[in-house]
Amino acid sequence: MKKTHSLAISVRKVFNIITHLTITIALLFCLNSSNAQQKVIQLYNGLPHGSGGRTSAEQETIKNPMNTKLVYNITQATLTAFIPDVSKSNGTAVIVCPGGAFQTLFIDWEGYDIARWLNEKGIAAFVLKYRTYHLVSDDPYTEMMDNINDSSFYKHVVPVWNMELNDAKIAVIYLRQHTKEYGINPSKIGIIGFSAGGSVSALLAYNYTTTTRPDFVASFYGFISDSIRKSGVQYDAPPLFIAAATDDELVPVTHSLLLYNDWVQSKHSAELHIFSKGGHGFALRKKNLPVNEWTNLFLNWMNVQGLLKR
């Protein structure tokens, strides 16, 4: 009887040990999976060329009307990888460029949140933290808005565009060199951007080389100046998706129209959606307006391009 009781206790002990080990392994696996999905990739070794010698520390704040994270004074470009579950993956990869008037990045709102949404659709997302104009105050949002309202400011931003364009090019090269690592198709690598990020994606759409050509491009309420358009549309320009709102208070909708017209007049594939209401920076915010349909329209467009097929 004692032997039977002792055996039962031993069995319970072994069972408890196995259970604890299983739970521990599962937790470690989840942690590792989470870290793998948000791997941060340095795009340069050392200070990138063209940074003007700036070495100031990158900073963050949530001091802004939206109470969302702003990153500013970025001197080291990175990609943050968000990889979908293998069972969902379709092999398409998107470089996501958040906006912030070339001076800050709304890294959650127009970056990480977009990346997680893309993951749900089986798309690998890589949030590009590109280099930005240097700010000097401890209130970057107010300084950014003051700069936007200064008509002479954009002449100071043009040199920054060269850095941001190079960051986008390096991001494309990196992904093409690491397709197996991330389970992506080398011919299904695109770039999308919001506001100033839409300008970065447009810059690349006009100014790629053989090794840096994106397979598709999207610009959402992007600032598209003559300086961005000056090189013209290339003969093998990638398919383009554009969305904006007529009542945009920061970037006139005519910027999106210029981008669309350039593609159409050069006889390249483009799709344009202009919503009557939605303002600037609608991204994934729920507005109970037709503008919220941009996500479905974008996915439909991607499907037509063959980007959602496994």
Image (cartoon, rainbow, N blue to C red):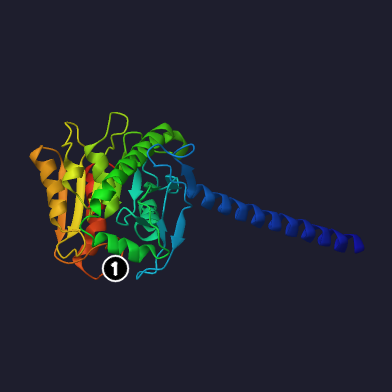
Measured as percent of width and height from the top left, residue 55 is found at: 47, 46
Measured as percent of width and height from the top left, residue 173 is found at: 37, 34
SS state under label 1:
loop
Q: Quadrant of the N terminus?
A: bottom right
When asked about the image quadrant of residue 10, the answer is bottom right
**Looking at the picture, does residue 120 appear above or below residue 164?**
below
Point out the residue furthest to the right here.
Answer: 2
Measured as percent of width and height from the top left, residue 85 is found at: 45, 48
Residue 310 in sight in this render = no
Is 63 or 215 nearer to us in this picture? 63
When asked about the image quadrant of residue 202, the answer is top left
Which residue is pictured at 25% across the width and 60% down the height?
148
Residue 116 in sight in this render = yes
Measured as percent of width and height from the top left, residue 284 is found at: 31, 62
Residue type beneath disc 1:
Lys
- Residue 218 as seen in the image, left or right of residue 266: right
Which residue is pictured at 23% across the width and 40% down the height?
205
Please name the residue that numbered disc 1 is placed on: 286
